[in-house]
Amino acid sequence: MTDENLSSHLAELDLSPSPELAAEANGTEALYAEAEADPEAFWAKQARERLTWAKDFDQTLDWSEAPFAKWYVGGQLNAAYNCVDRHVEAGNGDRVALHFEGEGGDTRTVTYAQLKDDVCKAANALTELGVEKGDRVAIYLPMIPEAVATMLACARLGAPHSVIFGGFSAEALRTRINDAEAKVVVTADGQWRRGKAAPLKPAVDEALAGDATPVEKVLVVKRTESDVDWTEGRDVWWSDVVDRQSTEHTPEPMDSEHPLFILYTSGTTGKPKGIFHTTAGYLTQAAYTNSVVHDVHPETDVYWCTADIGWVTGHTYIVYGPLANGATQVLYEGTPDTPHQGRWWEIAQKYKVSILYTAPTAIRTFMKWGADIPAKYDLSSIRVLGSVGEPINPEAWLWYRKNIGNDTAPIVDTWWQTETGAIMISPLPGVTTLEPGSAQKPIPGISAEILDDDGKPLTDPEAVGYLVLTKPWPSMLRGIWGDPERYKETYWSRFGDKYYFAGDGAKYDDKGNIWLLGRVDDVMNVSGHRLSTAEIESALVSHPSVAEAAVVGATDETTGQAVVAFVILRGGAQDDGDATVQELRNHVAKEIGPIAKPRQIMVVPELPKTRSGKIMRRLLRDVAENREVGDVTTLADDSVMNLIQQGMGSGKED
Ligand code: WT7
């Protein structure tokens, strides 16, 4: 569709909420006014109504040491109790918590009563392995029910978990394990990926080898029946230690501000940041947003969030939000095209999925595969669709609604971050008249503004500025693990300590909708995964052949952005063309993980730098996106760009 056709098509659509949906939706227009009138009272009510407290709190928010927030001060609760036990106590033990679907077709149905038993056994096992309240546990597991049980077992013990995405390399694992000083690692022999067993445990062995490691025990789930190396005294099988445990375990109430988890994410420097979240505020906003934004009705809906638990979306919208709400969900281990490109729709049909939450990059991939694939399945159960991770382009929005959402399902385009913990900007189904491509407005309880370079609020339509959040919110990050200064500096200094700087560009349209315009820092978004240019650059220069490297995110039709690298080889190193490029791509995969592999690496004689030596990424982005190169007048040597462009076209992906 041309842009013009698309706009006229969009203009003809009625995207106001249907009366049926409006009548039943959890979200209401009244919530906005209520939250606006007294935000703290609003959040206090959400916390008391949605969670079960061992001890009520006496103060909703303590912001006296801003930007270090304390929510629900004096309160006590246990997150695992809220996610499982209380549903069983309320008589819903037989309700399905997880419809697990393994990639190879093996399935497991886990009810809330069973999940409670699994969590208790895992908590008892971790205790036996020496885990105590406050100790950190690293989790490097596939998308299997044990992963959910382990996270909740940690929460039950008050041992913050640090989940590390299964696609990260041994090196990435080592950095994260050491930074969090994890005492125990929970992993599996391997995971199923595209019909093959992909090993996991070898990466853990490598990450723990060498210098002193903080890790004392490694608990290993048998998933792929692969041969693994074994370190006696350190490694134990899940089947030996967890299966024999008692299903009784008393959850200890935790302080509202007790750390719940650490999750590493990429920032503007080479070192990943350990974002940490605490118990009550995080759980409140997770449960609230899953209810009003995804519109989950736990008695009737089957909800499916396709994220991996290694990312924040999996934490908040597979584990904590839906389980706190007592929802029934699908958990799928594998890739969307195994064994065929209709796998997701087959699963959605089988379980009668009614709410689907996924990423624009997946939708664009399905568009490429063709609408005839989902058309073969009965998707009539779907009533709400969600999108997360990057802006969703209007074409993908329309395709999603038409081919997956029966041409009627509202799409909630949800903007948030690892740091925000839960959804911040999004339409509400049944309430908002939708605007394809825009996340629209802050949800009730959340306040945002768009500022110009000098920190002045922008309100004119189309004026581009920086997105900031203007009030603390319950699920906000409490800091960067071990680095309070970096927390202040990264998020609370760009516009002073009253504004949380999100790192995203944004604008309003003439209807007052917010449009997110991508990162304004050196962070890239590839398939909804956050990658740092600096981290990939330092991976590249750690290769003996590389003298210098510059990385940019170039627009990519499917993945949103793609990693493009420019490297200068060392004096003695030989440029073997494709072989060199392959070697460097594999080196990045080894240092960080396959997700960080550059799409393209160009070996260049020089990099464009200003007189003060700063690399001008803007010019490299022009080259990577096949545009005419912009203004080069500030370059120290303006012939550099000619040299670089002459070498273009080489180093393409295999
Ligand atoms: C960055 C956060 C939120 C969980 C997954 C990613 C981008 C996220 C949207 C959206 C436009 C979005 C932003 C943000 N982003 N959702 N709906 N529209 N941009 O979490 O890895 O912490 O990345 O993802 O740039 O800052 P994350």
Image: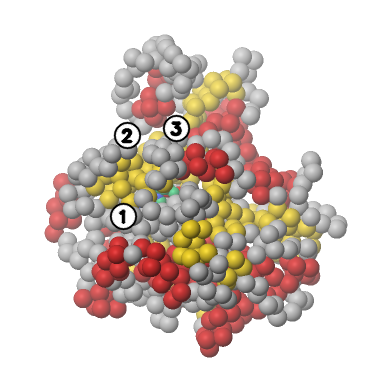
Tell which tag, 3 or 1, sits nearer the viewer: 1
Where residue 388 appears, as percent x and y from the top left, is: 40, 56
Left or right of residue 530, residue 182 in this image: right
> What residue is drawn where x is 57% and y is 71%?
77
Q: Which mark is residue 439?
A: 1
**Which quadrant would residue 192 be assigned to in this image?**
bottom right
Judge left or right: residue 540 versus residue 305. right
Colour scheme used in the picture? secondary structure
Residue 5 in view in this figure = yes
Q: Mark 3 or mark 2: which comes first in sequence?
A: 2
Taking depth in this image into account, of 384 and 279 the one nearest to the observer is 279
Q: Where residue 231 sits: x, y (%)?
A: 83, 54
Question: SS class of the residue under badge 3?
Answer: strand
On residue 453, which mark appears?
A: 2
Q: Which residue is mark 3?
A: 552
Q: Earlier in the sequence, mark 2 or mark 1?
A: 1
Q: Nearer the viewer, mark 2 or mark 1?
A: 2
Q: Residue at x 30, y 68 (%)?
A: 34
Q: Amino acid at mark 1?
A: Ala
In this view, the mark in front (3 or 2): 2
Q: Nearer the viewer, residue 379 or 638?
A: 638
Q: Do the numbered discs 3 and 1 sit on residues whose CB atoms are within 8 Å?
A: no
Determine whether the beta carbon of the residue marked 2 sits less than 8 angstroms from the nearest atom of ligand 1.
Answer: no
